Amino acid sequence: MEHKFKPEQMTKKYFTPWVIVLAAIALNGLAFLAMRFFFGIGSVTNLNNQFPWGIWIGLDVGAGVALAAGGFTTAALGHIMHRDKYEVIIRPALLTAMLGYTFVAMGVFVDIGRWYYIWHPLIMWNGNSALFEVGICVMIYVSVLYIEFLPIVTERFIGRVNLPGFLNRFNLLVDGLLRKLDRGLDKTMFIFIIAGVVLSCLHQSSLGTLMIIAGPKMHPLWQTPVLPLLFLLSAFSVGFPMVIMESITASKSFGLKPETDVLSSLSKFVAPLLGIYLAFKIGDMFIRETFVYLAEFNSTTILFGIELVVGVIIPLRMFLSEEVRNSVPGLYIASMLVIFGVVMNRFNNFVTAYNPPYATESYFPSIGEISVTLGFVALEILIYRLFVKIFPIISVPLKNVGLKAKYAIRGGLK
Amino acid sequence: MSQNRREFLKTFAAIGATAATLTAVTPKVTKGKSTRPLSPNRKGVLVDTTVCIGCGKCEWACKTAHDIEPGSINDYNTKLTDNSQRRPSENALTVVNQIDISNANSGKIKLQCMHCEHPACESACIVGAITKQENGAVTWDTDKCIGCRYCMVACPFQIPAFEYHKALDPKIVKCDFCINRTTEGKLPACVEICPVGTLTYGTRDELVIEAKRRIGKDPDKYFNQVFGEYEVGGTSWLYLADKNLVDGVFPKLGTNPAPGVSESIQHGLFAYFVPPVALYALLGGVMWLSKNKEKNEGGH
Ligand code: SF4
Ligand code: SF4
Ligand code: SF4
């Protein structure tokens, strides 16, 4: 039995009680952000000369990049390996990646002391710096994501251009331009799709290289020369769970039936990917004999344990079970755990593991830092909701389709 | 379906294996900046902590030379007795501490940027705002810095400080080896003012010889180590003391340049852009193959 799906604009009304709550969280974050810009980073964060990086880097950037991995993993699956079945999830994943990376860029923008110089890495290069690599790759990748999104915009407006007021004399012209753009994109899109996957592999791993230079300042449970590989593998494994989680959430919120069929096939990839990650993580621990640190019982080892057991091993077991993979709540919980595990891992790498030599007290994020981080998440969800109302992103089952009719995704490689 | 999956996994495994090989194998072949030749005339300072009386005049002189409000020069010797390990900060590029905080008679030690031979801060800086100068000084460029604070994450001695409370133009602040003074032929301000000769300014290679001469002449007085000769690949500032400074004052560090591992991984992943291009080609190939397969199977 094959369902026919077609991406459509959501018609449900925008405001719900949840949306109001999210808006409040977002506003609270923005208020603290305003303080940061008027009075400096020190006025809202607990950062100091010992702890230069906090959750704005660890979560907003570190975890943000990882959680946007759904974009390139689904692009690889749907476009590069041509598993057509998964086309229904490509658009939501693309939108999440696009918004996710936009917010990563915002996270960097508010965290760096001299935000007005954020463009400097474009012309001032330091090839030795892992951060430079991450910065450049993310900048290019954001642009690629916007390009990948363009076909959805053209699809939305072709034949429906209706400019307000006297501008409407340009309707035809704009429509023509859109059609031209659409045709051009259709021919070249595969270049961007492959580039997106390559760029993702590069900066997902370089993000792992970042903390290596901190050397002995970083706890040996996390500090390892294979960090780039671990970051890449964990990004691979969190991509699909992110897509599954979002898809289920969106279906619930817009009153659609979850695409259980597609999601449970997708979930079959998760266990192998998680397994490879776990194997490398444990293998590395044994090669470097860092398991000796687990004999100590303190907050660091507890956090390591939670990351590994709750965030990797339990969901791995869950994704191996067919029962879980075929049930919506099962999928949802297992996916949430993987996401939690990767968020924990990034937090641990950038915050928990970092032990500066002269710290007199340890770092804990301030109310301001937490507010901004939560505010960004809330804002991202709000924009996502807005976008799925404006653009055809989420697929709905087609009624009255002809036997031969197949849904078509514009812009993908046909 | 299971057919598809097997193939997917195969392809994915291929990608994984490629990435793994890239990360694991190439680093050894390529060399980072950390091995570039250094000028034989680069300067350094030998700090003989057994001579220091803790008067704090160097702190005062340093502030004066860097437009930081210094206060009265006579207030400085009392700062030592507040029993805390002070750290160089945005308000003081150098500080003098008791080596053993609980013992007022212990040696005194002046701390500042070590001016590493292969600085982690320089390697890390996203825009190349930090430079190891020919004369040994590690300097920071306000026209480039974006304030990301990665240099602070990287520095093994936790030296660079940041002006967290400035909304506009916050600076990375650290000892600049008085580069403005030394280019004019003057001594660094701290070296010039020291009344007892704790600080010796000179060519680094000669300072190492001098330090060893002192140890040889008076082996009972000195702990047998010139701190900074080999640590993190060597530093321009060198220390002599009557005890081991490691773990009490300085962190325990290896002798490899701090940026070594990260630079070789970085250059391995990007060796002449071969790995990214290879990955691009690989993915292009997979895309083309799976597209063709689809055609052959009648478009399913
Ligand atoms: S001590 Fe730190 S700040 Fe100074 S040169 Fe070395 S790495 Fe850079
Ligand atoms: S804070 Fe400035 S000097 Fe330090 S790494 Fe960032 S850009 Fe470079
Ligand atoms: S060399 Fe200059 S900047 Fe460095 S501690 Fe001495 S006086 Fe201060």
Image (cartoon, coloured by chain):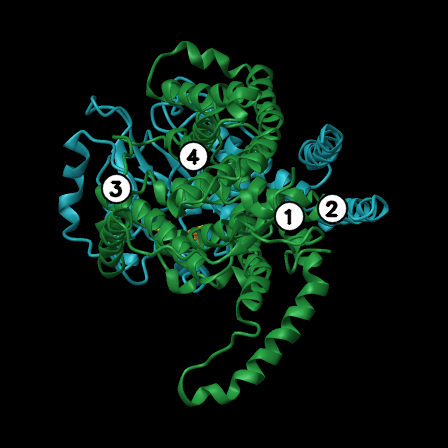
Chain colours: A green, B cyan
Q: What type is the residue that disc 2 sits on?
A: Leu
* Residue A168 versus residue A354 in the image, above or below: below
Marking on residue B283:
2
Chain letter of the residue carrying label 1:
A
A403 left or right of A309 in image: right
Q: Looking at the image, do the residues carrying marks 1 and 4 touch, with CB atoms under 8 Å apart?
A: no
The residue closer to the viewer here, A43 or A360, is A43
Q: What type is the residue that disc 3 sits on?
A: Asn
Between discs 1 and 4, the one toward the N terminus: 1
Between discs 3 and 1, the one toward the N terminus: 3
* Mark 1 lies on residue: A197
Q: Helix or strand or loop: what does disc 3 sit on?
A: loop
Marking on residue A343:
4
Residue under disc 4 on the same chain as residue under disc 3: yes
Q: Quadrant of residue A173?
A: bottom right
Residue B79 position in % (x across, y down): 17, 38
Residue, x 33% and y 29% (percent of image)?
Answer: B50
Marking on residue A46:
3
Residue under disc 4 on the same chain as residue under disc 2: no
Residue under disc 1 on the same chain as residue under disc 4: yes
Label 2 crowd (10 A; few <14 / some 14-19 / many >=20): many
